[in-house]
Image (tube, coloured by chain):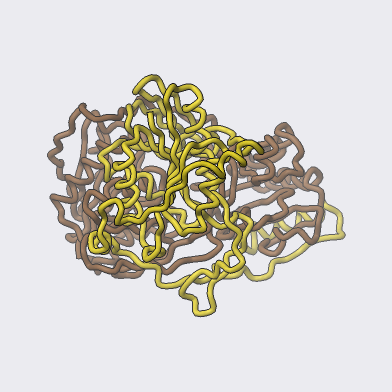
């Protein structure tokens, strides 16, 4: 079996979850690093190939072009297509990030190839795996039914990255990119926050409607600053205008997977818990001892969040200073 | 101009999803159905463009079961002109590539200029179909759209990616756009709107009507859901109540450090 791994970068920074996909690819090929190739797409990304040494792939395809500075579905799909035609993989593997999801859905019809997205468990021979549905309320056992070319993306931060031999020799891909495409990526506008996105965060502190106002969310931000957490919110808090849409955790928000999730004044609706159920440790703070959130909490504190959170922040500070 | 909105019927977000006793399917006997929440933003955006554009028709199309009719009617009540249901009988469990192939054929037959859809359906959570439809048509697509401006044939669009970052695109019609939450606030159907919707055209067709034979679609179908399980239950946690908040918090912080080692 041959596996091509799309290794994602933004601003010439390799996404660490690329190593997770490489690990799975190498395992599928029985440790035969000659059968694994990585693909880097960008502008001036040749220097990144050395970071891929010792990660299970002997070859790194470089799609390097000024037009590839920012993600653009047309150009990136052209680069991926070129790598696929050159390497002739059985499986193309990526990560279910915003870029990975977009690119893989774009390339699948071009090869009439099946696509499994957001796998949280994968069979060793990559013939299928497990994928959350309904924001994680259930898990589906999914399989490819044919042994032809197939595509899959893995959920980030789920699979352990493990180093193995792999020379990661760079090979420049011959590309024929044209400016005559119906869409241009003008720029990437930076977010306000330097914090990792909720979907990538290892620590999250989130608030519910009982915060009562946008201003009062500041006690969560204070705590988040101390432990390097990203602040999230329930749908009720977002709908009340206390938090922005990109902060929403749950079925119509983001599905998160942190090591630590601190829920403050979040009652725990079905759709909220679906989005954060896979958090490794959950701390819940709520005045209502019957709040559903306590059913999935590792540690529950029945208390007023306005009293408990500042104390929590102080304790974290003492611990980490 | 003709705008087509792709709509999917999904179970309500507050519905408990039940796995059938043989584990092979989802038991929907208790499910309450809604318009996929993101599709409401798609409908709203189409209607806003219609309000600013002369001779603009908004069509709502859905590939789904006959019961999805009611969902299309909701879109008509919001203000769309016409509905189109492509009956998925025989294809209830088809994968996204098959769905996209069918919808691409519908879009071609309808000769539309602009296609809106929700950024993802909240049942299978794939984010596949809108993007795949665009590729089948050879059109550009932008998914997870948070802002857009249409100026003649040209559009400038913002797409949300990780870390609150936005990718800013410039594109032109025809294009497929996947609506995200912050794009707009969907209107409620008015009472006259609901009355009018009952009289609007809602055609029911099959994939065959769009020239797609069973065999063509069968070759595309290459994935299968073999069964479903519930996620593992978390072991019962430790509850703290009735003590001074200071004491309870101190205990939890100690456990976070020493027992689960996450701080």
Q: Which of A95 and B183 is in front in this view?
A: B183
Q: Nearer the viewer, residue A56 or B97?
A: B97
Give the side of residue A203 with respect to residue A141, left or right: right
**Quick one: quadrant of the N terminus of chain B?**
top left
Q: From this viewpoint, is residue A270 visible?
A: yes
Q: Which of B154 and B90 is in front in this view?
A: B90
Q: Position of residue A298 (x, y in %)?
A: 67, 63
- Residue at (57% x, 56% y) in the render: B33
Q: In this view, does B115 lie above or below B251?
A: above
Q: Position of residue B244 (x, y in %)?
A: 86, 54
- Residue at (38% x, 25% y) in the render: B155
Q: Position of residue B218 (x, y in %)?
A: 27, 64
Q: Residue furthest bottom?
A: B22
Q: Which of A133 and A46 is in front in this view?
A: A133
- Give the chain letter for brown: A
Q: Is residue B91 above or below residue A108?
A: below
Q: How many marks?
A: 0
- Residue at (64% x, 36% y) in the render: B192
Location of residue B77 by image quarter: top right
Q: From this viewpoint, is residue A202 visible?
A: no
Q: Position of residue A227 (x, y in %)?
A: 61, 44
Give the side of residue A192 with respect to residue A148, left or right: right
Give the side of residue B225 with respect to residue B16, left or right: left
Q: In this view, does B85 lie above or below A68?
A: below
- Residue at (76% x, 44% y) in the render: A210
Location of residue A22 by image quarter: bottom left
- Give the chain letter for yellow: B
Location of residue A314 by image quarter: top right
Q: Residue furthest front?
A: B199
């Amino acid at each position: 079996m041959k596996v091509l791994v799309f290794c994602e970068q933004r601003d010439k920074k390799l996404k660490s979850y690329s190593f997770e996909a490489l690990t799975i690819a190498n395992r599928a090929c029985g440790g035969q690093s000659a059968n694994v190739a990585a693909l880097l797409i960008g502008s001036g990304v040749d220097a990144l190939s050395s970071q891929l040494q010792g990660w299970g792939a002997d070859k790194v395809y470089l799609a390097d072009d000024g037009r590839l500075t920012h993600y653009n579905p047309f150009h990136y799909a052209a680069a991926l297509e070129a790598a696929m035609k050159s390497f002739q993989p059985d499986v193309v593997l990526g990560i279910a990030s915003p870029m990975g999801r977009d690119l893989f859905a774009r390339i699948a019809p071009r090869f009439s190839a099946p696509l499994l997205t957001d796998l949280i468990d994968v069979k060793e021979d990559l013939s299928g795996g497990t994928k959350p549905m309904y924001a994680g309320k259930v898990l589906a056992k999914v399989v490819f039914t044919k042994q032809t070319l197939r595509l899959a993306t893995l959920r980030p931060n789920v699979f352990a990255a493990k180093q193995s031999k792999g020379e990661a020799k760079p090979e420049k891909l011959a590309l024929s990119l044209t400016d005559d495409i119906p869409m241009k990526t003008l720029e990437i506008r930076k977010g306000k926050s330097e914090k990792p996105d909720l979907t990538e965060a290892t620590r999250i502190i989130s608030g519910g409607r009982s915060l009562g106002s946008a201003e009062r969310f500041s006690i969560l931000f204070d705590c988040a600053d101390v432990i390097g957490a990203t602040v999230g919110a329930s749908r009720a808090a977002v709908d009340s205008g206390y938090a922005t849409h990109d902060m929403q955790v749950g079925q119509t928000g983001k599905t998160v997977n942190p090591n630590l999730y601190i829920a403050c004044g979040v009652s725990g609706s079905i759709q909220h818990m679906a989005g954060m159920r896979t958090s490794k440790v959950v701390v819940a703070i709520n005045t209502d001892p019957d709040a559903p959130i306590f059913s999935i909490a590792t540690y529950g504190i029945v208390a007023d969040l306005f009293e408990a959170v500042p104390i929590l922040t102080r304790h974290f500070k003492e611990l980490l200073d | 101009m003709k705008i087509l909105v792709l709509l999917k019927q999904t179970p309500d977000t507050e519905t408990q999803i039940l796995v059938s006793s043989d584990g092979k399917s989802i038991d929907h006997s208790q499910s309450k159905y809604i318009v996929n929440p993101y599709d409401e933003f798609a409908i709203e955006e189409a209607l806003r463009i219609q309000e600013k554009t002369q001779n603009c028709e908004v069509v709502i199309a859905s590939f789904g079961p006959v019961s999805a009719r009611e969902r299309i009617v909701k879109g008509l009540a919001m203000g769309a002109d016409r509905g189109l249901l492509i009956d998925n009988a025989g294809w209830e469990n088809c994968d996204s590539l098959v769905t996209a192939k069918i919808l691409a054929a519908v879009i071609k037959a309808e000769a539309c200029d602009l296609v809106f859809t929700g950024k993802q359906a909240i049942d299978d959570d794939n984010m596949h179909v809108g993007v795949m439809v665009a590729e089948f048509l050879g059109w550009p697509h932008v998914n997870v759209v948070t802002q857009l401006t249409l100026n003649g044939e040209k559009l400038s669009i913002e797409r949300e990616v990780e870390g609150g970052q936005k990718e800013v695109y410039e594109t032109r019609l025809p294009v497929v756009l996947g609506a995200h939450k912050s794009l707009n606030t969907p209107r409620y159907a008015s009472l006259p709107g609901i009355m009018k919707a009952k009289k609007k055209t809602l055609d029911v067709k099959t994939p065959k009507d769009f020239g797609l034979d069973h065999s063509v679609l069968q070759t595309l179908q290459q994935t299968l859901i073999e069964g479903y399980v519930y996620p593992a239950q978390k072991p019962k946690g430790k509850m703290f109540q009735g003590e001074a908040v200071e004491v309870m918090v101190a205990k939890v912080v100690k456990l976070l450090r020493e027992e689960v080692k996450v701080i």
